[in-house]
Image (spheres, rainbow, N blue to C red):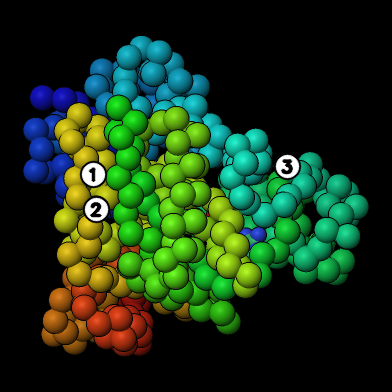
Amino acid sequence: MKKAGILGGGQLGRMLLQAAINYPVETFVLENDLHCPAAHLCHHFVKGDITSFEDVYNFGKDLDVLTIEIENVNQEAIELLEKDGVKIYPSPAALKIIKNKILQKQFYKDNQVPTSPFIITQNIQELEQQINFLPAVHKVGTGGYDGRGVQVIQNKDDIVKGFDIPAVLEKSVDIKKEIAIIIAVDDKDKTAIYPAVDMVFNQQLNTLDYQISPAELPEKILWKAEAIALKVVKELKSPGIFAVELFIDLDDNVWVNETAPRVHNSGHHTIEGNYCSQFDMLWRIMLGYPLGNTAPILPAAIVNLLGAKGYTGIATYQGLEEIMQVENIFVHIYSKKETKPGRKMGHITILSKEKQELIHQANKIKQTVKVIVE
Ligand code: ADP
């Protein structure tokens, strides 16, 4: 039986382990937090730091395959493990490019992948010299996650909000739509592409409202987006699961925003909505089985359950009973003991043939379900 390790023990690891149960595989998780979402679902939990060379190397050295659920893992350790013969998904070389937004943008440029024009800034003084490039979005090279490390710089007055560390300054795109496309790549470079997902944002709060799949897009734009996403993955030359986030602008141009080299929030609906989920797919890849069927069973929407504003402490979930009376609703609670404002605590998936019904139910979930404290 193969031994498979996951670096990180959050909800992505948790859902990956749920899918692992169906396969002949012995699972290992490396994570500092003994009570993390993945801790109780693996065969072997190892307490340790994913950013430490020793911890990652010692964790990985007896494994057959290794994957990540967060990008900022110790790079030198996974490079050495790869040399030792451990199969790593994604490859350390691909991860190195993606984990730094400066290298990632440069990679798109070098490979003629459409992405918004950008300038690299080392510090705030260099940002100050780019007034003519505004409006733009400033993003830290490393260390940013889920909106932290991203600042919109509309004009001169916003420059104080910029970062005083190496960062990219990207031209603002006039976004009509944000979509994500998940692509699976196996060891023989075979690919399988999931239907595009619409990421619908709350304009006022600038938070993700809900996601719907398949995305509603004219065929020509969809084909363009799929071709671009495939090109990104092909040039990364790595097996694994990749989520390519794209912008469609007001003139229907398609731009790559960023890529995640792992299972992704924009693919959670695939657990119930598609024949082969993104998690099942990653096991197929890591264990050397054929790729699965990415087709949807039914259109799906997901709503993230975020910790409500004003509540910090032991989490409780309000409104689940009411929402679970709705047909084809699937609740996923990540087993995080403590909530805080904005923390991802779970998600809910809805399946329906009718798009209007998906939107209606997504809004209902947002109004009904609240993560608060006991
Ligand atoms: P994170 O990695 O933290 O999710 P992103 O790079 O995806 O950060 O940026 C977060 C959000 O900021 C995007 O979803 C998008 O709405 C907005 N954004 C990012 N880059 C641009 C851009 N070049 N032009 C306009 N909006 C952008």
Disc 1 is placed on an element classified as helix
Give the side of residue 96 with respect to residue 277, left or right: right
Quadrant where the N terminus is found in the figure: top left
Disc 3 is placed on an element classified as loop
Q: Which residue is mark 1?
A: 281
Evaluate if marks 3 and 1 touch, with contact meaning CB atoms under 8 Å apart: no
State the image quarter where residue 148 is shown.
bottom right
Residue 131 percent across, percent down from the top left: 88, 60
CA–CA distance in space, label 3 to label 1:
35 Å
Q: Is residue 114 visible?
A: yes
Evaluate if marks 2 and 3 touch, with contact meaning CB atoms under 8 Å apart: no
CA–CA distance in space, label 2 to label 3:
38 Å
| Residue in the foreground of this view, choosing between 20 and 50 | 20
Give the side of residue 353 with respect to residue 231, left or right: left
Residue 243 percent across, percent down from the top left: 42, 50
Evaluate if marks 1 and 2 touch, with contact meaning CB atoms under 8 Å apart: yes
